[in-house]
Amino acid sequence: MEITAISHAESWFQILRIDKWVYALRERLDWIDPRFLTMFANNYLIIGEKKAALIDTGIGIHSIKKAVKPLIKDKEIFVFNTHHHFDHVGNNHEWPRIYVHKFDLHRVALPEELIFLRTSDGVFSDEFLKKGGVTKPADEHYPLIGGEVFELGGIDLRVIHSPGHTPGSISISTSRKHLIAGDTIHNGSIYLPPKETLNSYSHSLNSLIEEVIREQKCTVLGGHEEPIVAQENIELLGQIVQNWQKISNEKRQKYNDFLKAHILSYPPFKFVIPD
Ligand SMILES: [Zn+2]
Ligand SMILES: [Zn+2]
């Protein structure tokens, strides 16, 4: 698949056109703090014939609305969070209403302090510093449960509850064969949930692979790093997580003080395993 870069790698949001319907708006997480072992955070914009959808609102350091507006013009837009983590909800306050799974809603509805991010010169916008480095929630939140369908004109979105990474993680499949998987499936460093919820992550991953990805032969777009996740890497991720007990015991893990987690390198992935 040919991806076209619409804006320069140097501008804050690098905009990639994935196909006729989907854009990736990505930003550099490592410019803000390299200790997350992640280069890019990806937000997705889907533009239908009548309406649009933004999936995740970014880190909140720079306005995502300014990047989205020229692309959607006057179209109505639905704004989703795939889950509550700070790198996916940072510009929620720019939109009147956020669609988020009911299990992550209480986290999204509260301001979150980002002082734990190491500030580097030029990265934090004046606007962000004026707010004191705190993410501001939107005025209104719509609780999702999974199964909801949003018609954008020429393309429909379906919400899938895929708990594990967080209790309210969602994935969004489209009628044009995309699966926007948030932090449930992506390239690079995979942040695993605590032991108690690893089974639920494994279950979500396998049902996405079996019931959506293989069956609909869809392009999987991840929440971090290079947007498209290759089919063989998705299968590998599914197998690793399913056989986690065996693999994690066999392989040597390094401890990371900042993340307070063990790191297990399993190319092309790195697993971040909380204590
Ligand atoms: Zn996350
Ligand atoms: Zn993330």
Image (cartoon, helix red, strand yellow):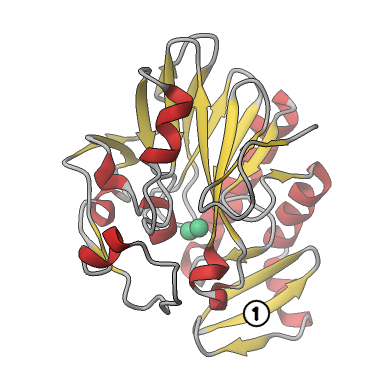
Q: Residue at x 72, y 26 (%)?
A: 215
- Quadrant where the N terminus sits is top right
- Relative to 270, residue 81 above or below: above
Q: Residue 10's spot in the image, x, y percent?
A: 60, 55
Q: Residues within 10 Å of mark 1 (few under 14, many from 20)?
A: many
Between residues 55 and 8, which one lies in front from this camera angle?
A: 8
* Residue highlighted by disc 1: 263
Q: Assess mark 1: CB under 8 A from ligand 1? A: no
Q: As shown in the figure, which amino acid type bears the numbered disc 1?
A: Ile
> Could you say which quadrant of the image residue 218 lies in?
top right
Residue lying at the far left of the rendered structure: 139
Q: Residue at x 59, y 18 (%)?
A: 175
Q: Residue at x 40, y 30 (%)?
A: 69
Instruction: Give the number of marks.
Output: 1
- Relative to 265, residue 125 above or below: above
> Could you say which quadrant of the image residue 124 lies in?
bottom left
Between residues 243 and 169, which one lies in front from this camera angle?
A: 169
Disc 1 element: strand
